[in-house]
Image (spheres, rainbow, N blue to C red):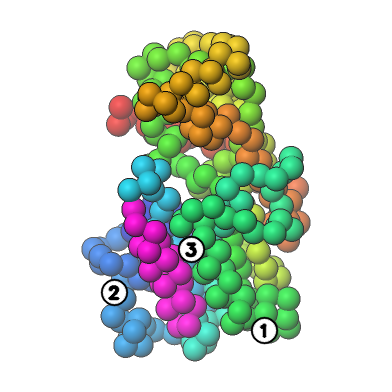
Amino acid sequence: MNILITGIHGFVGSNLVKALGAKHAVYGLDIVAPFKTGVVKTFCWKDLEENRLPVMDVVIHLAGKAHDTKNQSLAQAYFDINEGLTKKVFNYFLESKAGKFIFFSSVKAAADSVPGDILTEEVVPAPVGPYGESKIAAEDYIQDNFDLDGTDDRLVYILRPCMIHGPGNKGNLNLLYKVVCKGIPWPLGAFDNRRSFTSVDNLCFVIDGLVAGMVPSGIYHMGDDEPMSTNELIGVMCESMGRKARIWNLPKELMQGIASLGGVLHLPLNSQRLNKLTENYVVSNAKIKGALGIDRMPVSAREGLLITLNSFKEKV
């Protein structure tokens, strides 16, 4: 098949090229167009606007503005890119002969904090902040222009992955790894929170299944099978470094008091940051596994994290 991937030169796009390139003709759509092994050709956005693309069978829309953890981006920039580009690419799909459209949204479009024990597709979306709000606006546009529950011969998927990681990615996982590398003890061991992660290998496995199979249209959450606590994550990090984990189980009340003081004194740890570091965020992947007819993802959460963490060694 001919597959068009927007944002093909990014972290996820590069991994999808490796996963899909051996079986399909992969084309790119990006703001840059250098040669890339496994890609027939990368088009620019003007090519899309002027309808200069060959006939595609599948469109995978990855391009977007990632969550700025430093909160330095203007809110409108998220909507211009995450909503605006999605409208442009989805309109292209509707007017094309492509049979499948896969949109990469985010669990942050569903909820900034998980209500209850686990986040499922049944949750009423309540995003907080321009990143999640722009992603749900893009989802709404797709659903306003395509009936996901209808009988259309074409298939549309809205995929909501939680934190994606793998060799070559950048983000909070890298920052925590660098802290652990310096031997700085983790002082929040008393908070046994659990979070879901998404190995890029599992993500590529799911995309391959959506491309090759006849999975019903719909919204699907994406994550590894096993959630992990931050304490377990630090343990795996130290295992990859060949050292013993340094985790301090300081009283919760003490750390909450320090965080409260940090808000007044503008210290790195404040109450809001403490809550984010210690909250639970467990995402269900039951729906996508059921749709693909599998019991487990091919890579366990621990295996996937070790692959990612071992790749960090060369850069620290």
Report, in whole angstroms, how far the alpha carbon at label 2 lies from the one at label 3.
23 Å
SS class, disc 1: loop
Q: Magenta stretch?
A: 73-92
Q: Overall secondary structure of the magenta stretch?
A: helix
Q: Which residue is mark 1?
A: 153
Q: Are marks 3 and 1 in contact (CB under 8 Å)?
A: no
Q: What's the residue at 44%, 28% (across, down)?
A: 263
Please provide percent x and percent y for residue 285: 69, 50
Q: Amino acid at mark 3?
A: Ser
Q: Quadrant of residue 170?
A: top left
Report, in whole angstroms, how far the alpha carbon at label 3 lies from the one at label 1.
28 Å
Q: What's the residue at 46%, 57% (across, down)?
A: 130
Q: Amino acid at mark 2?
A: Cys
Task: State which mark lies toward you, 3 or 1.
Answer: 3
Please provide percent x and percent y for residue 260: 50, 24
First in sequence: mark 2 vs mark 3: 2
Q: What's the residue at 28%, 80% (across, down)?
A: 46
- Few, some or many residues within 10 Å of mark 1 (<14, 14–19, 20+): few
Note whether 97 is above or below 215 in the view shown: below
SS class, disc 2: loop
Q: What's the residue at 64%, 23% (across, down)?
A: 192
Note whether 310 is above or below 7 in the view shown: above
- Few, some or many residues within 10 Å of mark 2 (<14, 14–19, 20+): some
Q: Which residue is mark 3?
A: 134
- Few, some or many residues within 10 Å of mark 3 (<14, 14–19, 20+): many
Instruction: Point out which mark residue 44 bears.
Output: 2
Please provide percent x and percent y for residue 227: 65, 36
